Amino acid sequence: MIIPGLERTQKLLKALGNPEQKTKIVHVAGTNGKGSVCCLLQSVLSLKHKTGWFYSPHLIHERDSVRINGKPLSETQFTHFYSIVKSRDSQIESGCTLFELLACTAFVIFCEERVDVAVIETGMGGLLDATNVVDPILCIITKIGLDHTEFLGSDIKSIANHKAGIIKHQSKVVLGKQEFDEAVQVVEEQCVKQQAQLFKTTDYPVFESQIVNCPLNGDYQRENLASALLGLECLKTRGFDIQLQEIVAGLQNVHWPGRLEWIKYKGKQILLDGSHNTQGAQKLKEYVATIRKGRVRWIFGCSNSKDPKELLKLVQEGDLVYPVVFGPVQGMPWISAKPVKELYALIQDPIIKPGFLESLDDCCLYDDQIIIYGSLYLVGHVYQIL
């Protein structure tokens, strides 16, 4: 269940000794690209600094989303810290949601493990997100678009207000390239209000040039790389020693599952992407245009809260679509897949198979390109069964 608000998280963290106040935090918000920016940042920082990383949603297990130097804790370690947090939550009756418990667990882990810095991705929005209990040394806001409108508002300005809610008094703020002027204006106004120092990647084109190779597929990832590189420059002013050779080496190690990722199955190269909103689908469409060789077989599934019409606009005449569902998501019982029957009416001549694996096996019988997309939860489903 999603219940926006900070009171429950603040109450529990106070009972835990406020671990979030004992760690240097980089806080990242945005509609699209925030996960990629976090991944890029932690990959570079972890070469020389002990780096925590919290992201959502997790692909398979909850502990996947809490990492140190890019690696998740062992199940024993994670269970130990999660049990401490859950026990304290029960004692004081804070009523935290499952996501809030996970966020608090991440803060406790990073504090106890004495990380040098923690890269924290917001779960949804920013202003009322459970992660927005920190006083970060750096805020990064990536591209803002329409998503989670039932919680954040139905227009760009309302959503931008939530994203800009992570900006704190006299903080340093990196703003990635934006599609909407209203989003830029909201962030600028919030920076003035908070006396924060704003750095826009559009003012530093060198960071989107070929200064270093982008390790992730898709031209749009250069925008995310620019945000990460500008963020690293800001961290230098906070005392972090980061050299160009370390940036190059760190980027070579980047692996970000389900973001224009090529996987192999039965000798076939398959594109796997977690695009789940209009902006993300547009970026996937642009990338597919560069690699398309003919007919595409799309394996598509989305969460129940999404509008599949926008996502299905990627499909061209002559393509084939296999509607599928993903299984239950660990630790997120409020997430469910859009029923296949609801997708039938939106797809011309859908290919109906009993399940995801049967759909994939059928695709592999042909020479057409295969693309799996529609949800990060579907990406997690793929990782679980392949």
Image: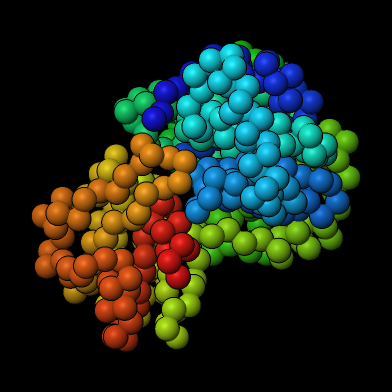
Please tell me which residue lies in front, 30 or 222: 30
Left or right, residue 357 beside residue 132 = left
Task: Give the quarter of the image for residue 341.
Answer: bottom left
Question: Residue 4, how many percent across, how many down?
Answer: 45, 22
Left or right, residue 256 beside residue 375 = right
Determine if residue 309 is in view.
Answer: yes
Please tell me which residue lies in front, 280 or 298: 298
Q: Residue at x 37, y 26 (%)?
A: 151
Seen in the picture, residue 100 relative to 324 is either above or below; the reply is above
Left or right, residue 298 beside residue 20 = left
Q: Quadrant of the C terminus?
A: bottom left
Determine if residue 204 is in view.
Answer: no
Picture colour scheme: rainbow
Task: Give the quarter of the image for residue 108.
Answer: top right
| Image mark count | 0
Please tell me which residue lies in front, 157 or 271: 271
Q: Residue at x 43, y 40 (%)?
A: 332
Question: Residue 2, how many percent across, how many down?
Answer: 41, 28
Q: Residue at x 71, y 65 (%)?
A: 252
Seen in the picture, residue 78 relative to 92 is either above or below; the reply is below
Seen in the picture, residue 26 relative to 11 is either above or below; the reply is below
Please tell me which residue lies in front, 50 or 281: 50
Question: Residue 202, how many percent across, how many down?
Answer: 60, 42
Q: Quadrant of the N terminus?
A: top left
Left or right, residue 210 beside residue 282 = right
Q: Residue at x 42, y 23 (%)?
A: 3
Question: Residue 360, how many percent across, how many down?
Answer: 32, 73
